[in-house]
Image (cartoon, rainbow, N blue to C red):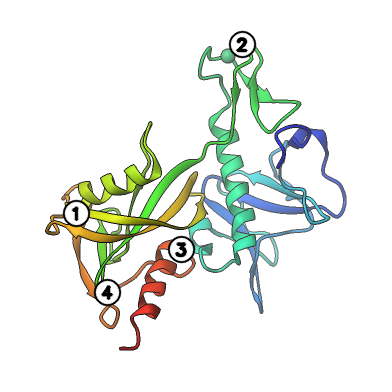
Amino acid sequence: MSPVGDSAQAVEPTHGDRWIVLRAPDDVLVDAHRDGVGILFGAPPERADPTPLLVDSGGGSRIWAAVVPEGTANPDGAHFTAARTLVGALDPAGFGQLARARMLVEWQRTHRFCGRCGASTGPAADEHAVRCGHCGLRGYPRISPVVIVRVTRADEILLAWPVRAPRPMYTVLAGFVEAGESLEQAAVREIGEEVGLEVDRLTYAGSQPWPFPHSLMVAFTAQYAAGEIAPAPAEIRDAGWYRADALPDLPPHGSIARAMIEQFRLAHATR
Ligand SMILES: [Zn+2]
């Protein structure tokens, strides 16, 4: 999206546009059909927020995000579901639309007042931003980068069960990038902090929007360099080295974490 001349306020919804319907704070309206689930609807819901957000204007038709209040009942033929359950259920393009809708709505919901002077903000006329009506400060959609790192040692992969997962779920390590860090520095620091290992040979391995609520997962692979696993109790319940033929409970399909683990499994499957 260009920074100028493509703001949500330059156009109004028209017949033929499609709608993503979010129910505050975490649910999205889905239409289950034989090919899977759909999140695009042909009309806005009755109780929607009066100012929809433009999610996508490419590919011929526009897509808007509308928000309905918490407690709104399921309409006929569709139902609300937690957005997290759609990881792996939507194709990358569809998940990208959902991610953008959620991130824009979250941004609008949390930037109603200026962080500098406290006055009310409103949509900027010339770009996708909110602008303070008093001092002119602009706020942009918030994106928080997270590094996610697959560490291997010969034919073993490092997997860890994070404290935030209530049931056993072993995954690759991840953490937020801190102010002033490069992605590579963050990756090395996270592995050191969470399991006490040193790694090297970092290689970029892709990225994925992760709208829970506003992250961008940036994936790397790395090689074990030194140290013994020592999980940080505040973050990691358990961690270990696993072979491809004996993997523990894994994160859901559709996540970049699972994709990286499956790539490891494929590379080491036949020997
Ligand atoms: Zn201000």
Which-is-in-front pick, marks 2 and 1? 1
The residue that disc 1 covers is: 195
The residue that disc 4 covers is: 248
Farthest residue in the right direction? Answer: 15
Give the side of residue 8 with respect to residue 27, left or right.
Answer: right
Q: Secondary structure at mark 3?
A: loop
Q: Tell which of 125 and 78 is nearer to you.
A: 125
Under mark 3, the amino acid is Ser
Q: Residues within 10 Å of mark 1 (few under 14, many from 20)?
A: many
Question: In x, y percent, where is residue 96?
Answer: 61, 55
Q: Is the CB–ligand 1 distance for label 2 below 8 Å?
A: yes
Quarter residue 132 falls in? top right
Q: CA distance from mark 1 to mark 3?
A: 22 Å
Give the side of residue 67 with respect to residue 8, left or right.
Answer: left
Give the side of residue 242 with respect to residue 90, left or right.
Answer: left
The residue that disc 3 covers is: 255
> Which is more N-terminal, label 1 or label 2?
2
